[in-house]
Image (tube, grey):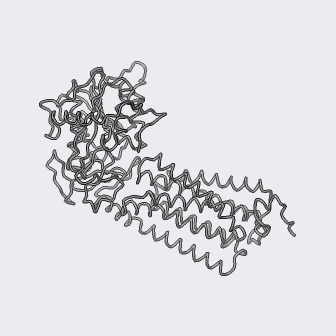
Amino acid sequence: MIDPPEPAVTGVLGPSQATAPVRLPVPAGLGRLLVLLVVFVCAACGLVYELELVALASYLVGDSVTQASVVLSVMVFGMGVGALLAKRLRCRAAVGFGAVEAALALVGGSSAMALYACFAWFGQSRSALVAFSLAIGVLVGAEVPLLMTLIQRVRRQDPGGAVADLFAADYVGALVGGLAFPFLLLPGFGQLTGALVTGAVNAVAGGALVLWLFREDLTGRARWALLAVNALALALLGAGVLLATPFERAARQAVYGSAARVAVQTGVQEVVLTGGTGGGAGAGRERKGSGRPLALYLDGRLRVSADNEFRYHEALVHPAMAGGPHGRTLVLGGGDGLAVRELLRYRTVRSVTVVELDAGLLELARTDPGLSSLNRRSLSDPRVRVVTADAFDWLRQRAAPAPGHRPRPYDVIVSDLPDPGISASTKLYSQEFYGLALRALADDGRLVVHAGPPGARPRSYWTVDATIRAVGLSTVPYRIDGGRPEFAGGPDRAADPAPRAARPGPAAVPAAGALRYWGFLLAARHSPRLDVAPDAPVSAAVSRETLRAGRYAVARGRIPGLPPSTLMHPRYQP
């Protein structure tokens, strides 16, 4: 006969009936090991749900730091709520744990598909992100009190030892789940199917533990109810796996406004091409295939539209080329080859070095018929050398060359990088980054930087200006009209050029009649002159007059006294 629990044990584990021994189909030692194995599996699944929400939120909403903070804080809060709610289930721990795991498997497994659906068809997923983070947190938090009760029912032991065993299995499972997500699930299944498969594993583990190991704890009615709930959850998750590909295709069409001609998940980002396979404004703007111009999306955000990308790239490149020698040039980013196209229009350019992180984007820029036509096959030009590397790391290595090797400086450096409001790009707009770029710049060289829209995010724009000035460079700010109000291409987070009804993406669409501008900064050791050469191969949209007008217009909105952004104190707002 088992002695009644001591008061200390009752205070931790609940009433005596909650921790009374249970008849098991296996020896108690093996049963305890099986419970710890289920703890391990559930912990791995829980961390996969958490990482999947963080990754998907960063992709769909942007700004990985903010989204990770939201997901983690809401989920941890939910775990506390779940732990409190689980106190009411300890008297029927087996039934409660079975119901919790079935619900967690269904909610966690379907979360990626639900978030993507909200993003694609409703235009935003922030509310759904918070709701799923809270729901998953509540269910994960309810696991530990119930498992503690179950493991004590298998074999009574000191509460401290039981807690240590339980959390050891939990933490090791979290390690396995954390490693499995980036190295197994994402590359092998993708986000949607990976979450669904994780949910199925979660349902099988939780259901098997309760329906087999603790079956004596269940009434006939409870056993059939749990069996039906788990079967339904597995059926729904299995249907999700079967429908994942057509669902993703339909959602992608809703996001991009037309069927994606190319969709590639590189090691860095998702690259999608829609529209025709002809060129852009500089190449006749053929519209084959879909009848729409080519559009390039990176992680769901429009980066290039063949309709008027030339405005952005001409305004980025040609003012820097007009200020002096430009035989040796460097492009940081620009993996689409469009900035390189503009540089190669000068016969006096002897070499162009392109430093781009995404090898998959570079490959598409070389081989895709639409994109390679738009960039005039610039990356295959013999004057171009392509380096696949992080721009910050590459500049840092260049600044510390091997003994006896001193690399030659560049006459022009073109910074064609994503918007500073995106967390992953913050270091590429830091004082340390511009200090490294300065060391690579010739004494009479020029640096031109895409700095984001000065009207939509003026504080970020003028923070870039303050950061460049902090390394000892003089700057000239200017902007250029982005064209159609509904188009905001270039590296800024942009609206889809599709009709408004088919444009449910995350970026804000400018109000009717509003103009969207791209903002740039031209920098040099001595005060640079904003101009274009008389014979510069530019369109009427980028002329000496439009540049000067853009300079005066943007200068009126200057925000003085802003501190520079550094690696240790980033100051850009998402």
Residue 506 placement, left or right of 153? left
Q: Which quarter of the rendered picture does the C terminus lie within?
A: top left
Q: Is residue 132 visible?
A: yes
Q: Residue furthest left?
A: 535
Q: Residue at horizontal 49%, vertical 69%? A: 237
Name the spot of residue 405 as percent of width and height, x first: 38, 21
Where on the picture, by quarter, is residue 318? top left
Where on the picture, by quarter, is residue 226? bottom right
Q: Residue at horizontal 65%, vertical 77%? A: 223
Q: Which quarter of the rendered picture does the N terminus lie within?
A: bottom right
Name the spot of residue 117 as percent of width and height, x first: 40, 63
Q: Residue at horizontal 67%, vertical 60%? A: 144
Q: Residue at horizontal 16%, vertical 51%? A: 285
In the figure, 214 relative to 476: above or below?
Answer: below
Name the spot of residue 352 as percent of width and height, x first: 27, 32
Name the spot of residue 327 as percent of width and height, x first: 23, 26
Figure label count = 0
Q: Is residue 41 visible?
A: no
Give the camera-side residue of 138 and 349: 138
Where on the picture, by quarter, is residue 334? top left
Q: Residue furthest top?
A: 404
Q: Residue furthest bottom?
A: 220
In the figure, 347 relative to 68: above or below?
Answer: above
In the figure, 110 relative to 400: above or below?
Answer: below
Give the camera-side residue of 128 and 367: 128
Residue 88 placement, left or right of 501? right
